[in-house]
Image: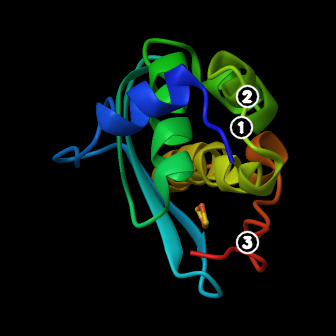
Amino acid sequence: MAYSEKVMEHFANPRNVGEIENPDGVGEVGNPTCGDIMRMYIKVDGDKISDVKFMTFGCGAAIATSSMATELIKGKTIDDALKLTNRAVMEALDGLPAVKVHCSVLAEQAIKSAVSDYYKRRGIDPTPIVGEIPEAEHGHCAV
Ligand code: FES
């Protein structure tokens, strides 16, 4: 299994790791089958994501994709952040081995979950905006 240089670099030096104090939204997704959990914190200023941080128990591919995903949404509007797909994150990392594609779903869904929490805190039903957030497809993870 070969990882791209970008994946290795983001795995070795992940961006935006940690917690945000007094976040505007927190999302947590994961699957108990492989024990991999991702928590994402966002700070929102107007309609923009002014800060984002993550913590994960996921594997190296999950760390690299979350690092890249947070870089891609920081400073962007909530709408743009919701449009970010795991495919786009993988492309930005020059690809992932096929058996690791599912790891990248954690980051995409954690962003949606955090935005969903942001709307809920403001008394807004997030489902029409964010959609349903399914469980990450992780049942086959071999950690
Ligand atoms: Fe990669 Fe589950 S996140 S093995």
Q: Are marks 2 and 3 in contact (CB under 8 Å)?
A: no
From the viewer's perspective, is 125 left or right of 114? right
Residue type at numbered disc 2: Gly
Residue corresponding to mark 1: 96
* Number of the label disc, if any, that sits on residue 138: 3
Q: CA distance from mark 2 to mark 3?
A: 19 Å
From the viewer's perspective, is 138 left or right of 73? right
Q: Are marks 2 and 1 in contact (CB under 8 Å)?
A: yes
The residue at the far front in this view is 1
SS under mark 3: loop
Give the residue displayed 69% in from the left and 22% down from the top: 79
* Number of the label disc, if any, that sits on residue 95: 2
Residue type at numbered disc 1: Leu
The x and y percentages for residue 129 are 77, 40
Q: CA distance from mark 2 to mark 1?
A: 4 Å
Give the residue displayed 65% in from the left and 39% down from the top: 2
Which is more toward the observer, 143 or 106?
A: 143
Q: Quadrant of residue 72?
A: top right
Residue type at numbered disc 3: His
Q: Earlier in the sequence, mark 2 or mark 3?
A: 2
Q: In this rendering, is residue 94 above or below 103?
A: above
Give the residue displayed 49% in from the left and 60% down from the top: 59
The x and y percentages for residue 81 are 63, 26
Q: Residues within 10 Å of mark 1 (few under 14, many from 20)?
A: many
Q: In this rendering, is residue 116 above or below 15?
A: below
Q: Is residue 133 at all visible to an observer of this figure?
A: yes
In the image, which is nearer the foreground, mark 1 or mark 3?
Answer: 1
Assign ligand 1 to one image quadrant: bottom right
